Amino acid sequence: MSQRIELNRRTFLRTAGMTALAGAVSTNASIASAAPSATAEPSDGVYDFDEIYDRTGTHCTKWDAQIKKYGKENIEVAMGIADMDFRVAPCVTRALQARCSHENWGYGIPADSYKEAIVAWNKNRHGVEVDPDSIHLAAGVHPALIAALRAFAPPGSKVLMTTPIYSGFYSDLRETLTVTADSLGTLENGRYSIDWDNLQSQMDIDTNALILCNPQNPTGNVWSEEDLLRLGRLCLERRVVVLADEIHCDFVTKGNKYVPFASLPDKDVVNNSISFKAVSKTFSLAAMKSAYFFSTNQDFLDRVNVHHRPDLNTLGIVANEAAYREGADWLDQLLPYLDANHDFVEAYAKEKMPLVDYTKAQGTYLAWLDVSKLADKIDAKGKADAANKTSETRVTPEGIVQRWLVDNAHVYTNTGSSYGAGGEGHMRMNLATPRKLIELAMDNMAAAMDKL
Ligand SMILES: Cc1ncc(COP(=O)(O)O)c(C=O)c1O
């Protein structure tokens, strides 16, 4: 470990008041005994997103999975996976504690009030009217999306996506035996736009569905009404159903606006779509396994529901409803914090990281870093080619960069190559974490790169 990294780590731990950032994975019993008994309800109504809330030892993917893979000495800052390091909104913990005080966990039905909360959130925050009867619940976006793919895209048919796009969609396509049709966006000044000619050329007889991601993970695009209408009309014309994944919709950075597909001013376009959403990103409730989808097209919903089994989790519903009903203030305070995290990374990369470029995202809490100069400098392609002569699984240059950052900066990021066409030369970094941790990650990476 370099002197600079060691110094950073010591300074950081002192500031954070932590004894160990990267602890060993504990048992559920030790997690429970270590858990704070009260919720973090601020007396002055101001949430402290700077608090370093140690998640290690809770079997979380973000930290513990990387520590398990690379060793705790190699993971100082885990910056992958799309969930947040903050304490959850106190209203969620309160609702869960209240439900837990009733000691029976038999089969349940979702309360009507949950759908009412979904309708109110979508109307109040995004101006879209959703008919409660058109809302269907799911144990996550993936099961719902898989059911929709089964309904509209038979095995062997193509599913269109503008890329780079969320890696999880590729596993949904594998699951449904459908074929990926990537339409690579045009990249200019760090910002992607849809390559309309390419997109149109791929809408052939074998293409029945398009997955839209708005805001787009990992590129951070927030699609304009004009783009969405153009895309929607093209899909309608070519009989391609739009599966609109808008799970990141509550995260847009300053000056940007999320336009729900369901709010577009063309009824036929809207009727050719299904929207997929969840509380899981907005309030970091991913482990609660709860999502929902809706459409104005009853025939579409009927077709999806033939393949959909809505397994639900009582605590998930309780947590989700509480967040939508009472969590707006927590989220309103969080959004400027995340915006400033994006600004911080953009400025830092510009000033101190000549080998990394970052253009502030329009939405999501993810930073899509252009690391192509770093990849060249460490000959990531040459190393990947050499590794592939013996490796059973394909090694990508981004995999080499990922490992290099773990080994040299003790920072974990996601490989760009897992996000489809156009992911080369990029890494995805999660910024939903206290700024001190981002600073530590950036300092570590800068120090490692300075040595090249
Ligand atoms: C675009 C997108 N869709 C779906 C998901 C899966 O969400 P969940 O499993 O919480 O429903 C994610 C998670 O990262 C995502 O980024």
Image (spheres, rainbow, N blue to C red):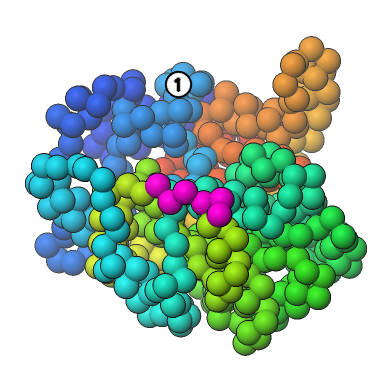
Q: What residue is at 61 percent from the left and 56 percent from the top?
A: 148
Vertical position of residue 350 compared to residue 35: above or below = below
Looking at the picture, how far across and down is residue 71, in whole percent? 46, 19
In this orientation, which residue lies closer to the viewer: 12 or 19?
A: 19
In the rendered structure, which amino acid carries the disc numbered 1? Lys
Observer able to see residue 208? yes
Left or right, residue 196 beside residue 396: right
Q: Position of residue 383 (x, y in %)?
A: 78, 22
Q: Is residue 370 magenta?
A: no
Q: Is residue 76 above or below residue 227?
A: above
Which residue is located at x 30 percent, y 37 percent?
54
Is residue 307 covered in magenta? yes
Residue 259 horizontal/vertical position (percent): 56, 76
Q: Which residue is mark 1?
A: 68
Residue farthest along the bottom direction in this orientation: 265
| Residues drawn in magenta | 306-311
Q: Where is residue 243 shown, x and y percent of the image? A: 63, 62
Residue 379: tell me if it is visible: no
Judge by depth and name the residue closer to the eye, 77 or 126: 126
Which residue is drawn at the image coordinates 33% and 20% (left, top)?
Answer: 24
Q: Which residue is at a point 55% across and 76% down the rendered structure image?
A: 296
- Drawn side of residue 44 relative to residue 243, left or right: left
Left or right of 100 on screen, residue 146: right
**Which residue occupies the foreground of this view, 334 or 420?**
420
- Above or below for 139 versus 296: above
The yes-or-no answer for disc 1 within 8 Å of ligand 1 is: no
Query: What secondary structure prevails in the magenta region?
Result: loop
